[in-house]
Amino acid sequence: MSDEPNQYYVYVIDLDKSVILNEKSFRDANPQYVEGKPCVYVGQSYLTPRERYEQHKSGVRSNKYAKQYGRWVKRKNIPDKNPHKSRGSAEKRESEVAEILKNRKWAVWMK
């Protein structure tokens, strides 16, 4: 019997826009960014998006941008259909969502 979870979620955390001003690596990774568009962190987890957001904010297995600049879990305008049946499916969709949002001229950080 496997301990592997049977549901995975792709999530998007809205980041305070000061991240684009304060963080050179974030800015450099987003040359497509248009001022005024959202700044976001895209991830995937077996935890629900809200649970994973809470982990980021408390510093548990957190990304520095999600922890310092994270404001909430975005639900509007996010092109995903949660949950996913496998980690592989969620990881693939995580990359696709990040690319879709970059094409919208958003600033995106993933992992």
Image (cartoon, helix red, strand yellow):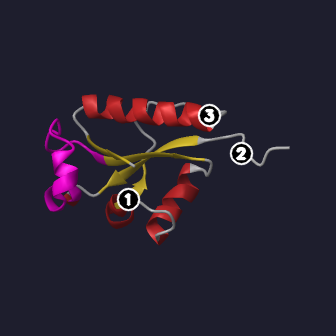
In the image, residue 92 above or below residue 36:
above
Give the CA distance from mark 2 to mark 1.
24 Å
User: Of the residues shown, which amino acid type is indicated by label 2?
Assistant: Pro
Label at residue 30: none
The residue at 40%/59% (across/down) is: 63
Of badges 3 and 2, nearer the viewer stands 2
Residue under circle 2?
5
Give the CA distance from mark 3 to mark 1.
22 Å
Residue under circle 1?
66
User: Of the residues shown, which amino acid type is indicated by label 3?
Assistant: His
Of badges 2 and 1, nearer the viewer stands 2
Instruction: State left or right for residue 70 relative to residue 22.
Output: right
User: Of the residues shown, which amino acid type is indicated by label 1?
Assistant: Ala
Residue under circle 3?
84
Q: Answer few, some or many: residues within 10 Å of disc 2's Cα (few below 14, many 20 plus, some between 14 and 19).
A: few
Magenta highlight on residue 52: no
- Secondary structure, mark 3, is loop
Mark with earlier residue (2, 1): 2
Residue 99: x and y in percent read 33, 31
